[in-house]
Image: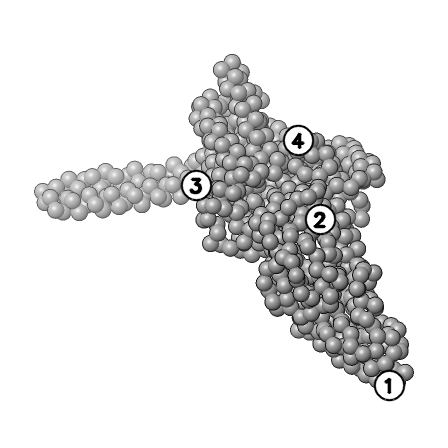
Amino acid sequence: MTQTIAPRVRTLVLLILAVAGALLAGAAPASAHAALTGSDPAQGAVVDTAPTRVSLTFSEPVAVGDDSVRVLDPKGERVDKGDPANPSGTTYSVPLVSGLPDGTYTVAYQVVSADSHPVAGAFTFSIGAPSETTVSVSAQAPDDGLVGWLYGFGRYVSYAGFAVLAGGAAFVLACWAPGARVRAVQRLVVSGWLALTAATLGLLMLRGSYTTSGRVGDVFDLELLGDVLQTKTGAALVSRLLLLAAAALFIAVLFGAYARTADAAPDHPGDGDGGEPDKRDLTLGLALGGTVVAAGLAASWAMSEHASQGLQAGVAMPVDVVHLLAVAAWLGGLTALLVALYRAPVETPVGRDAVRRFSRLAFGSVVTLAVTGVYQSWRQLGSWSAFTDTRYGQLLLVKIALVAVMVAVAFMSRRWTRRLADARGSAAAEEAERAEEAERAEEEKQPAGTAPAAASETSKTSETSEAGKTEAGHDAVRAAQLARQRAATEAARQKRLRDADPNRFGLRRSVLAEAGVAVVLLAVTTVLTQTEPGRTEQDARAAAATSSSAPANGQGSGALSLTMPFDTGGTNGKGVVSIDLDPAQAGDNALHVYVEGPDGTPVDVPEVKIALTLAAQDIGPLPVTPDRITTGHWSASGVQIPMAGDWKVEVTVRTSDIDQVTVSKNAQIG
């Protein structure tokens, strides 16, 4: 919940727009996720002689293993030998066996980018002439299956646990000291610690399979775990576990010694220091120690993910730490406030002063998020077009919209805060409490009167021991029932007292709405951290466009190349289909079809059909049904062109059971 003062908000918006314009106008190249930017031989190229090695060039340094690059012949047999080498910069090469025959070869790669994310892909090249191939490389990367889903879920839980742990503790220390004695708040912070610890252990176990095979069985492979511990990400996860041990000590002191010294007045202006030197020292020590531990936990993300790579990494990592701390203070503190409003005992209510203190803390957090977020956006996007042209930019727009919604809801929360009086100060609450006390007194009269009767009954039947035991058993049952009734009555009484003040009730509802948006915001942020940054996506798209144009100009490439955009009208129905015809003369020809999505990456579709028509000679349409070679690549050999002329080339693309379209171009053949 933010400080909703209109001049401050207007100033903040103007500041964000000014800084964003200045930064994005002067954007320079950078990268984070690795992307394949080039290869030798190039994708789809046809070379006259067999190469001695295959080289791959990425947008940033990557981690490679023994099987990171595989080269397969048309029968699916491996023809690479030795481990991948790094001859220069971001280029990695693998030697090939000598004497390779003509045909189409498949190159499959699986590496780990410097920001910890696995990157996988495949492409083909041909020696002499294209041929059919039995190789079918799965388009699914190791992070796309069940292990990838579990890893992503673990990341979400770890972010949520950190926010609840750090933000809940900050709320107690900075806003509401009596909260250290409230069971619900204690359980919340401890739950955050448990969630972060469990998620970190899970990520450590899943990491090996996540970056290699993607198989569930490899999660418990100790050899893979040993390899993970030697990586930067493994070191970050281990350091996080060590810091969580220190966080456990912090929690013990916060809810132990500090809770015992907490001011009994629930919302005293001196809340948090109590005016006693010992308590002030304890509060200061907890604040400093907690900040150091929280910053260390945040650094475990910054040192191993997007911030650690690309432009200005030395600046980006501290900025990322501050950004995460601000997120925790805002969202975690908001969660603690919500729990306190709904679960705090009537005797220890969250008063107006505590809510106002959190409002100031949250406003500072939002300002910090705005400044650090603008810098991170510039660093990961680099241009205004990346907001709409890349998935990272689109997710970032969703995140910005959710933040705006939270701030708008916070305006409502601030309105209720201004109206909120102390829990026992409002007339409605006092009247409700008096009525409840009268009802409670009436309820207590009846059990008090029945107790002697029960005792008298027991004494009358004391002559028979068995009967006495039976009666005593009935008394015990009645006592247990009475205890449960009293507990239920007390819980209902406290709930009615909390709901009696309409201002407090309105505040609870608006804070609940804020928290609901925060859950979605945290999910979007988690997905964002696993998404290829806009800069890298645009670089990879440009590289793919260059690569796809290589067959039209390279050695031995098709004499005819046609490119046609298509839109079947269904989900994921847009893309580009390219046709290469070699030698584009009368007689036998080799035909290749490439299908790419809007972002330039190869995609598979259920069906691709070709038809050739020479209207001037009333020939055709001649159907051609190419065979799938690999992802986004189909081929047909021995395509007969009866004579030269202006041929119409029609391509039918089907993207689902019902969505298909036919596009065409005319081309001079022969």
SS under mark 4: helix
Q: Amino acid at mark 4?
A: Pro
Instruction: Answer above or below: position of 641 versus 528.
Output: below
Q: Which residue is mark 1?
A: 618
Amino acid type, label 2: Thr
Q: Looking at numbered disc 1 in the image, what kind of residue is underneath it? A: Asp
Identify the image quadrant of residue 472. Answer: top left
Q: Position of residue 641 (x, y in %)?
A: 81, 79
Question: Which quadrant of the figure contains the C terminus?
Answer: bottom right
- Residue 54, horizontal then vertical, whole percent: 68, 54
* Label disc, if present, on residue 449 of the rendered structure: none
- 3D distance between C-alphas at marks 3 and 2: 66 Å
Q: Amino acid at mark 3?
A: Ala
Contact between labelled residues 1 and 2, with CB atoms less than 8 Å apart: no
Frontmost residue, 327 versus 629: 629
Instruction: Tell me residue 215's x, y (percent).
Output: 51, 55
SS at mark 1 in the image: loop
Label 1 Cα neighbours within 10 Å, binned few <14 / some 14-19 / many ≥20: few
Question: Which mark, by number, is residue 491?
Answer: 3
Give the quadrant of the N terminus: top right
Q: Earlier in the sequence, mark 4 or mark 3?
A: 4
Question: Who comes first in sequence, dot 3 or dot 2?
Answer: 2
Q: CA distance from mark 1 to mark 4?
A: 71 Å
- Other residues around mark 3 within 10 Å, as few (<14) / some (14–19) / many (≥20): few
Q: Residue at x 73, y 66 (%)?
A: 128
Judging by the rendered image, the residue that carries numbered circle 2 is 57
Q: Which residue is mark 4?
A: 318
Name the residue located 67 percent from the left edge and 47 percent from the top edge: 92
Q: Which residue is most to the bottom?
A: 618
